[in-house]
Image: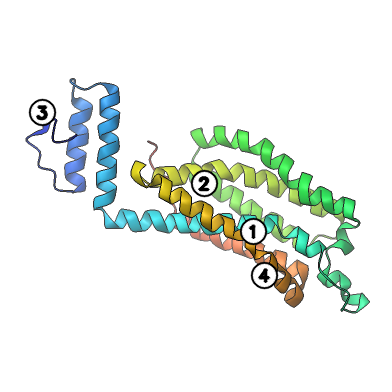
Amino acid sequence: MIKQMSSFDDIKFEDSASALKIIAEKIQNSKHLTSIEQKNIATELRVQEWESSKQKKIYSYFVLAIICLANMGAGWQDGLIAPAYNYDYSAVSPNMVPYYWIGSVIGDTIHFSTINGTAVIVPLLLSSFVAGILAEKWNRKWLYLVSLGLCALCTLGIAFSGTYIQVFGLTMFYGFLEGLSSPALISLITEYFPQNRKTSAFAIFHIISSLASSLGALTTIFIGLVGWRMTYGAIGAFFAGFCVISLFIIREPKRF
């Protein structure tokens, strides 16, 4: 497409960022192209720039890895309540049951069902729509960071909870925050990768994120070793760590 533009014959494309910027400026100043043609050429230039820059590729995939692992941690926390409640404590002494079984805090199976289902799903669905609007107007990096940081506090709070109401409330707030961060994460991935790489980037995102569903057995092992409170605490620390890493690594990308 670039070669067909006779008005740009004086520019030699050498896969350099400076050459791309010159072409982009000429496109913006050209009166011979429609807005659709300008948009298509700008997309092609972005692809060429990304493909020619090793630094951009490494950075994009590094950010993707951070986002994937943080999202995997969120999925792990979502499924933590079930093994914590269904843990087989029959082999431990009665005074150690509260150490391994979260049911000693939240109570019967009805309470467990509300936490495992309603407490997460309802606020997540409600916040996701609002979050989509916010991600279009606000800084997506900070929307993601604030949500992730508060998720860490909620998870750590559950580790110190002593009543059903506390666990239920913190789980609801966590579900709200999870829904709040999702559109920002998707938007960040979209901006960090050019058109011809978005599909593979999203494939990697979903594959790694889906690994959280396979951590149930690992969760049971953790609870057996350190108890349910320390397991929640470890995941909360995991969130906090990725929040700090993201603060210094992730930059708000330009919107396209």
Q: Residues within 10 Å of mark 1 (few under 14, many from 20)?
A: few
Q: Is residue 243 visible?
A: no
- Looking at this rendering, what residue extends furthest in the left direction? 10
Q: Is residue 191 left or right of residue 240?
A: left
Q: Which residue corresponds to mark 4?
A: 218
Q: Earlier in the sequence, mark 1 or mark 2?
A: 2
Describe the element under mark 1 as helix, strand or loop. Answer: helix
Residue 77 lies in quadrant: bottom right
Q: Earlier in the sequence, mark 3 or mark 2?
A: 3
Q: Amino acid at mark 4?
A: Leu
Task: Give the numbered dot on residue 7.
Answer: 3
- Residue occupying image coordinates x 80% and y 54%: 167
Describe the element under mark 4 as helix, strand or loop. Answer: helix
Residue 246 at x, y percent in the picture: 49, 56
Q: Which residue corresponds to mark 1?
A: 213
Describe the element under mark 2 as helix, strand or loop. Answer: helix
Residue 187 at x, y percent in the picture: 48, 41
In terms of depth relative to the viewer, which is nearer, 162 or 111? Answer: 111
Q: Is residue 92 left or right of residue 189?
A: right
Q: CA distance from mark 3 to mark 4?
A: 62 Å
Q: Earlier in the sequence, mark 3 or mark 4?
A: 3
Q: Earlier in the sequence, mark 4 or mark 2?
A: 2
In terms of depth relative to the viewer, which is nearer, 134 or 210? Answer: 210
